[in-house]
Every structure is written in structure tokens, then in C-alpha cells.
Image: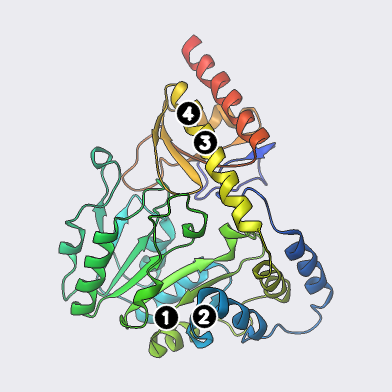
Amino acid sequence: MQRPDHGGDIYRNHIQVDFSVSLNPLGMPASAVSAAKEGAAASAVYPDSECAKLRRLLSVKEEVPPEWIVFGSGAAELIYALALAFRPRKALLMAPGFSEYERALLAAGCHPDHYTCSRERGYAAGEDFPDLVSPETDMIFICNPNNPTGVPVRWSVLEQTAAVCRENDTMLIIDECFLELCTDPAVQSMKGFLRDHGRLVVLRAFTKQYAMAGLRLGYLLSGNQQIRSRVRSCLQPWNVSIPAQMAGAAALGEEGYMEKALSCIAEGKEYLLKELEALGLSCIHGAANFIFFEGPGGLYEKCLRRGILIRDCSNFRGLREGSYRVCVRMPDDNRKLIQVLADCLREEHNG
């Protein structure tokens, strides 16, 4: 069976519960759902190409000037726009890591180098990562916490990498799409470096935080006007729909939603880690709203036959068969996952 490139393929399978995509377990806020419906009814006109209302609200939340924000149809569109706008000759990625960084770079004619976050190191980037940055390095993508392992990049590594990139005029792109759903308070944003680091870009999205994957709404933050202008030149003028803009604006007005979500994620992670390890599966105790674990091959297919979709991670660079990722969902779903995995492992043991 050919594996899908990403999670979330509920369209070609009979799925009861999808654990393959790592979204806010509370689902899209009711206010955002209502706003999206209202936006669909108002979609006989073109969207606001400047996303003015959404931009104003988001600048307050992110505590950055509104002009520092560039919106995209999901963060993925901005990843491709960055690669196409600057067409780096030499780029550096961490492995394993989100595959769209490499795809975007290849589409722009760049064959990136990779730094391996090894299993022996707990899939963490070492203090030697910044040493790979040279004056020839044009662009670096870092996902923090990393996908699919959930392992955060140590602050000392981020600081040193940022310093070396500044010295070498290297563009540093930090993907923080999972950061708002982190249960580890030590995982910090790099936003504070934007004012003094002209080649730093921070990527974020409504996708994970507000469970708005189908509406496609992401954004980048940059204090560099040239970077923003060049990225915009690679985007179509109406790339964010009216329903997405209105749903995003409504989501930003939610009170108590994120606090409830983080509590739910913390409790769910604790339960899942305990139960997964009790089943004999090797788990990475990451910081994100998902859990990476290793076990026998074939669990993807066995779970799929039982209506449970998990993320088979064997197609990530640097990972092997038997590598999986599951998101944290609501308690009943989490219990269902453990029961199904127990059944799958029992089947595996009994031959």
C-alpha cells in the first residue's frame, strides 16, 4: 500500500477517528464556524486582498506592527512562496522534518543539505547544528517543536543559529505552527528577535491552533519589508477566502478556548504516554500536541482496518518502518486509540 504524503486522508478510507493530523482537540470554535458560514454566504464578491480586519486583530494578539504580517492559504503556501521568492542556492534542513520544506526548495531549484537529528540523540538537534551555517548558506527552515517527533529545539541552539545567520546574512525561517499548542512552557517563540534580525521569518497558522485545516489560513511575521514584498510577489492577490478571513477574526476573539485546550492536551498526553508505554511502545516525550512512538511495522494498516487513522512516519527522511505519530484528542477518542492499538499488538503477537 502506498502511504499518503501527509496525514488527514479521510477521503479514501472508512475512518471513525483520525489521529493522523495534529489539531486542537476542541475542534474549531463555534464562533469561527458561524463566521465561516456567514462568510460563505457573502462570497459573491472578492475577498479583501489586504485582510484588513484580520490583520488588525492579529497584530494585537501577536504584538507586532500590522505591516509585518503576510497571510497565506495555510502556512504551506508561504513555505513555497519563500523558496520561490528567494531561490536559494544552498539551504539547510533538519531531518526528520516536515516534507514540504524540501519540496518547496526542490521546486525552486535547490537541493538542500540535511542535519540528522538521530534516534540515539532522542531526535534532538545538537549544539553543533549552528556550525553547519556558512556564508554560502542562503536559507534554513527549522520547525519548533519539530514535526513529526514533537522534540523542541533547545533555546541555546536557536539563539546561536540566529546569531550565525545574522553574521552570514542567511535567511532563518522558524516554523512555529505547533508552538501555541505546546504543553512545555520552556518552548519559546522567536518573535522577540524579529526587530533586530532582518533575515528572520516566523511562520504560524490557524490550522493547528484553531482546528481550521480545511479553511487554509496561515501567516508569516517579518520585520523586513523587502522579504515581505518579495513573498507577496509570489502570491495571488486573493489567496485568503472570505470564510477563512471571517473565521480567523472570530477565532481571535475567543476567550478561554486556548486555556481549555491546553488543559485537555496536557491530560490527554499524560494518559496516552502512560498507556502507549504500557503496551511496550517506545515514545518520545515531546512538547507538542502529538506523540511520536516506535513499534512493530504494520500498525498503520491494522489500525486502518479498525477505522483508526494514525500517521505512518516511515516516509520521513531519517525514520524507519515502525515509526508513528498520533495526535492528542478528547478522552473518549484517546481511550479508543489505546484499545485499538492493544488489539493490533495482540494480533501481531498471536501471528
Residue that carries the numbered disc 1 in the rendered image: 222
Residue shown at the point (32%, 80%) measured from the top left: 199
- Above or below residue 117? Residue 255 is below
- Above or below residue 143? Residue 43 is below
Location of residue 44 (image quadrant): bottom right
Sequence-wise, the earlier of marks 1 and 3 is 3
Residue that carries the numbered disc 3 in the rendered image: 1
Sequence-wise, the earlier of marks 3 and 2 is 3
Asked whether disc 1 touches disc 3, contact meaning CB atoms under 8 Å apart, the reply is no
**Residue 311 in the image, given as x and y percentages of width and height:** 51, 41
Q: Is residue 343 visible?
A: yes
Element under label 1? loop
Which of discs 1 and 4 lies nearer the camera? The answer is 4
Sequence-wise, the earlier of marks 1 and 4 is 1
Which of discs 3 and 2 lies nearer the camera? The answer is 2
Residue shown at the point (51%, 48%) measured from the top left: 289
Asked whether disc 2 touches disc 1, contact meaning CB atoms under 8 Å apart, the reply is yes
Give residue 70's mark.
Answer: 2
Could you tell me the amino acid type at mark 4? Lys
Residue that carries the numbered disc 4 in the rendered image: 274
Could you tell me the amino acid type at mark 3? Met
**Residue 85 in the image, given as x and y percentages of width and height:** 40, 81
Residue shown at the point (52%, 36%) measured from the top left: 1
Asked whether disc 1 touches disc 4, contact meaning CB atoms under 8 Å apart, the reply is no
Sequence-wise, the earlier of marks 4 and 3 is 3
Could you tell me the amino acid type at mark 1? Ser
